[in-house]
Image: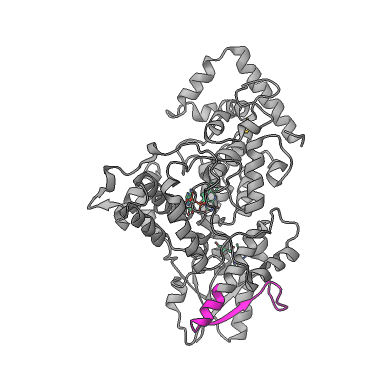
Amino acid sequence: MVNLVLVLGDQLSENLSALAEADKATDIVVMAEVASEASYVPHHPKKIAFTFAAMRKFAAHLQECGWRVAYTRLDDPGNAGSLPAELLRRAEEFDTDLVLATEPGEWRLIAALHEIPLRLTLLEDTRFLCTHAQFEAWAEGRKALRMEYFYREMRRKTGLLMEGDKPVGGKWNFDHDNRKPASGDLFRKPPPKAQDDDILEHALDLVESRFPDNFGTLRPFQFQTDRAGALCALDHFITHALPDFGAYQDAMLADDPYLYHAVIGLYLNAGLLEPLEVCERAAQAYGQGHAPLNSVEGFIRQIIGWREFIRGVYFLEGPDYTSRNALGHDRALPALYWGGNTQMNCLKHAVGQTRDLAYAHHIQRLMVTGNFALLAGVDPAHVHEWYLAVYADAYEWVEAPNVIGMSQFADGGVVGSKPYVSSGAYIDRMSDYCAGCHYRVKDKTGPRACPFNLLYWHFLIRHRERFAGNPRMAQMYRTFDRMDEARRTTVLAEADGFLRKLDAGKLV
Ligand code: FAD
Ligand code: DLZ
Ligand code: SF4
């Protein structure tokens, strides 16, 4: 009997396990643009256009390779509206009840596929380096899951930057050479722009007409939408940015959204690039003397370390992970996250860049938008929904542990051993935002005091019982306790005042 081979919008890889198991001569590849996937959160228009254009190009590529593809466009009259409904429609059309699929990256979709009254074979997603079983075995019996130890296992497993059983350069991690602030450089080359073509143009027109109210700017559209383009983006990164990736990976500049970042997360997550090929290219650049070890090690760690670790946590922790709220935060997400006006220059830039590009780099996500939401006590479910919607690389398996875990500490410490919170001083050190801000980063109290300075203490005091015993946080509490009492009272009262203004929707 014919198999329906489901290929999802983030499974655009020729070596996908479902395709490898299928028979090109008889089986039918099913791909569908559906309203349910396009609207489970209000995705950024660029993310939807990227997904549809890349799906269409991948379907055409499969057809060129001899596959029979049943492709449904969003505006096709027969579109059944969801992936399960599309599978049922195709099952009737091709008179079969067999479905072959690679495991989706989201519990929601895995559950939905299991509910379809068809015979489903769900295969492991072999595009990742660490299987569920390997991650579970690694996590078994550990008091805490720490990425650094997992990463060493992955280095050993892949042999990347290894000399026998020893790490190249004698150390696993070169982060102490990194974390430098950056200054503007007119000659820094941004990633290559998308070439206009009919498929992309049609996808852009469709998104423009069907999702006119979604937060985010659709045009100009800058992303690549096929494997050849993604490989160009990778080449660009290896040639122009990798050498400085390490040193400046935590830096932020108002006029340079990309700095030395790779801007390949969306290609990796959609299946247009493979993690190992990307890391091998970086390791080769080191071998050829083109990029220093601190950059290459740091970059490889993000991919075989963080990316795989984060996915392991998502599947280990189970479907309830996204509803965790260990700190009991319940504030609504401030309107400024959806483009509302703010006088906080760092947030204005991080959100503005997100709106325009569907991209912000790690430190903007963690230490500006994430830090503020955490300090302000925003409900992590709202924060999760925002991140899942606004970034072109956002899929739940990778977004949720980064947001619920790393950024909001809502998992109570599964991903991180302490919350990522900082006052304005960190943002000032790593960026040029503060110079152009209405607030004064040096002011700890008073009408122009940087809100991060006020909220930082408010957060720590709100959660004193939980964090005071954490050895990595004890120093912060000692600092607070050394302030004179009047100052402590003022800081907390001003923080309360700021939060009241925020809740009232006043300009902050
Ligand atoms: P670079 O900085 O150049 O890093 C190279 C690659 O390393 C990335 O493309 C990515 O594949 C990988 N990587 C780096 N850090 C992580 C990480 N923490 N988790 C997983 N992979 C990582 N990444 C996503 O892919 N999707 C998300 O939805 C997402 N949401 C995030 C939310 C928050 C609050 C935070 C703090 C981080 C999030 N990240 C997410 C991780 C990281 O910010 C992005 O992977 C990165 O910014 C993508 O841009 P880049 O390709 O230029 O990455
Ligand atoms: C993100 C996305 C969007 C916007 N649209 C589709 C779609 O129409 N069809 C599809 O197969 N996939 C889409 N995707 C990607 C899915 O949401 C993704 O496969 C799941 O979230 C699992 O990671
Ligand atoms: Fe952000 Fe505070 Fe700096 Fe303004 S002063 S940019 S609010 S950190």
- Image quadrant of ligand 3 equals top right
User: In this orientation, which residue lies closer to the viewer: 496 or 391?
Assistant: 391
Whether residue 74 is visible, yes or no, is yes
Q: Is residue 63 magenta?
A: yes
**Outermost residue, left side:** 164
Task: Count numbered badges in the picture.
Answer: 0
| Residue for point 30% across, 52% down | 161
User: In this orientation, which residue lies closer to the viewer: 197 or 334?
Assistant: 197
| Residue for point 58% across, 42% down | 325
Q: Quadrant of residue 376?
A: top right
Q: Up-down: is 505 above or below 447? A: below
Q: Up-down: is 188 above or below 36? A: above
- Direction from residue 234 to residue 220 in the image, left or right: right
User: In this orientation, which residue lies closer to the viewer: 422 or 244?
Assistant: 244
Whether residue 140 is visible, yes or no, is no
Over which residues does the magenta segment extend?
58-80
Q: Quadrant of residue 40?
A: bottom right
- Direction from residue 210 to residue 83 in the image, left or right: left
| Residue for point 62% across, 22% down | 443
Q: Is residue 175 magenta?
A: no
Q: Position of residue 396 (x, y in %)?
A: 55, 55
- Direction from residue 72 to residue 15 in the image, left or right: left
Q: Up-down: is 235 above or below 20? A: above
Q: Position of residue 154 (x, y in %)?
A: 34, 53
Instruction: State the quadrant of the C terminus.
Output: top right
Q: Up-down: is 56 above or below 105? A: below
What colouring does the structure picture have? Answer: one colour
User: In this orientation, which residue lies closer to the viewer: 443 or 491?
Assistant: 443
Q: Position of residue 440 (x, y in %)?
A: 64, 26
Q: Position of residue 328 (x, y in %)?
A: 60, 37
